[in-house]
Amino acid sequence: VKILFTQTTTDGILKYHLKPTRTTDGLMEIQYNADNETLTVRRQGRLDTLACRELTEALDRQWADGAAAGERLRAVFDLAGVDFVFSAFFRVCMSTARRLAPGHFAIVNASQEVKRAFHLVELDYFFQVN
């Protein structure tokens, strides 16, 4: 899977926008704010296996670029536009949380269905899911 990025910088925020491809139905945006050392991921649509692979590759690129380095780094997955998550997304969450200090990973704006999925696999104990 080849990911096409556009990169912009505004007000100290480095943004990577994943351009939609034929294989994805949603839009994903990754922002790194250097001022408060927060990495924010936003996604529209389903977080299926392909979308999770793209997200993993994008996060790996973010870590490799060094923009998201430091002990104070926080990561937030904003799921306001997500209506369904596949099990691959749980793996992405675990991988992301392992790279951060305890309590520095959160999932926000999750729908009731997504919250229920995290509860069923008992990951709501490990992550803040709001």
Image (cartoon, helix red, strand yellow):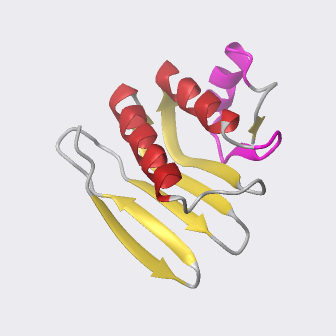
x and y, in percent, of residue 23 in the image = 21, 38
Q: Was residue 71 drawn as part of the magenta stretch in this picture?
A: no
Using the image, determine if residue 13 lies above or below residue 38: below
Q: Was residue 110 drawn as part of the magenta stretch in this picture?
A: yes
Is residue 86 something one can see in this rendering? no
x and y, in percent, of residue 24 in the image = 27, 41
* Along the line of sight, the residue nearer the viewer: 107 or 10: 10
Q: Which residues are magenta?
A: 101-123
Rendered residue at 42%/63% (across/down): 16
* Along the line of sight, the residue nearer the viewer: 113 or 72: 72
Using the image, determine if residue 9 lies above or below residue 44: below
x and y, in percent, of residue 84 in the image = 49, 31
* Along the line of sight, the residue nearer the viewer: 49 or 92: 92
Q: Which residue is most to the left? A: 22
x and y, in percent, of residue 9 in the image = 47, 79
**Quick one: quadrant of the N terminus?**
top left
Q: How many marks?
A: 0
36 displayed left or right of 12: right
Rendered residue at 57%/49% (across/down): 80
Q: Quadrant of residue 97?
A: top right
Rendered residue at 35%/46% (across/down): 26
Q: Quadrant of residue 70?
A: bottom right
89 displayed left or right of 53: right
Is residue 5 something one can see in this rendering? yes
**Quick one: quadrant of the C terminus?**
top right
Q: Quadrant of residue 29?
A: bottom left
Rendered residue at 66%/50% (across/down): 75
